[in-house]
Amino acid sequence: MSRMCLGALIVGLVWAGISGPAYAQDTLTILGSGSGAFEAPPVATAGVGTANCTLDRVAVTIACTARVHNIVDLRAGHLHVGGPGVAGPVVIGIPGLPLRASDDFTVSWTWTSGDLTLRAAQGVLKMADVFEACSSGNCYLNFHTTANPGGEVRINLCPQQAELGRAANPFFSINVCVADR
């Protein structure tokens, strides 16, 4: 009997080693909504936005769709690493934006590791670092305009919300994110 248990244990350990790290899942949806009120420091603007992104650990991509309303003279858009209330560094630019646009727009894109701007001082050395920051509520989309070059619409991103505004994070098996608060 003990030989059988030992054999099962060995098979289990070998299988765990072959299959790689045990993550709860390979994709995670993060989302948020925001305005100038979430900028650091806050700005007075009529601009608002929503975003929905999917982090894919296997493909090493982030696919997003953002809807922005009431914006005037769009100049740029980026993903920043930083928690709510913190002005963090740009790590990836948003491609395909309707620059100089005013009013409303919707844009969809997919980032790969080749799009990443490394930020060693902030611990962003690879796409997995961005995944970790975003999955714990420490990243945001920022849309910049001529009137507010530091950011006019900030969308704090967080895993889909669970009870009481906290999100269980199945990507890293943690429970830390409170979006837009």
Image (cartoon, grey):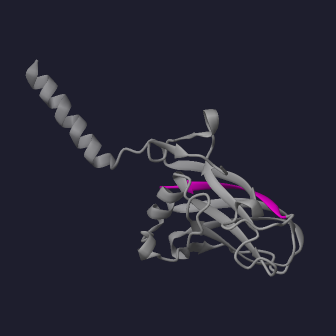
Which quadrant is home to the N terminus? top left
From this view, report whether residue 168 is shown above or below residue 2.
below
Secondary structure character of the magenta stretch overall: strand
Q: Does the magenta stretch include residue 95?
A: no
Report if residue 161 is visible in the image.
yes
Relative to residue 178, is residue 153 drawn left or right? right
Q: 5 or 50: nearer the eye?
A: 50
Q: Who's the residue at 80% across and 79% down the image?
A: 99
Q: Who's the residue at 54% across and 49% down the image?
A: 27
Report if residue 59 is visible in the image.
no
Q: Who's the residue at 65% across and 57% down the image?
A: 156
From this view, report whether residue 79 is shown above or below residue 23.
below
Relative to residue 126, is residue 2 drawn left or right? left
Q: Who's the residue at 82% across and 66% down the image?
A: 44
Q: Position of residue 84 (x, y in %)?
A: 61, 57
**Seen from this angle, which residue lies furthest top?**
1
Q: 23 or 51: nearer the eye?
A: 51
- Res 109 quadrant in image: bottom right
- Res 2 quadrant in image: top left
Numbered range of the magenta stretch: 47-57
Q: 83 or 71: nearer the eye?
A: 83
Q: Position of residue 83 (x, y in %)?
A: 56, 59
Q: Where is residue 106 in the image (x, y as percent from the top left)?
A: 81, 63
Q: Is residue 56 magenta?
A: yes
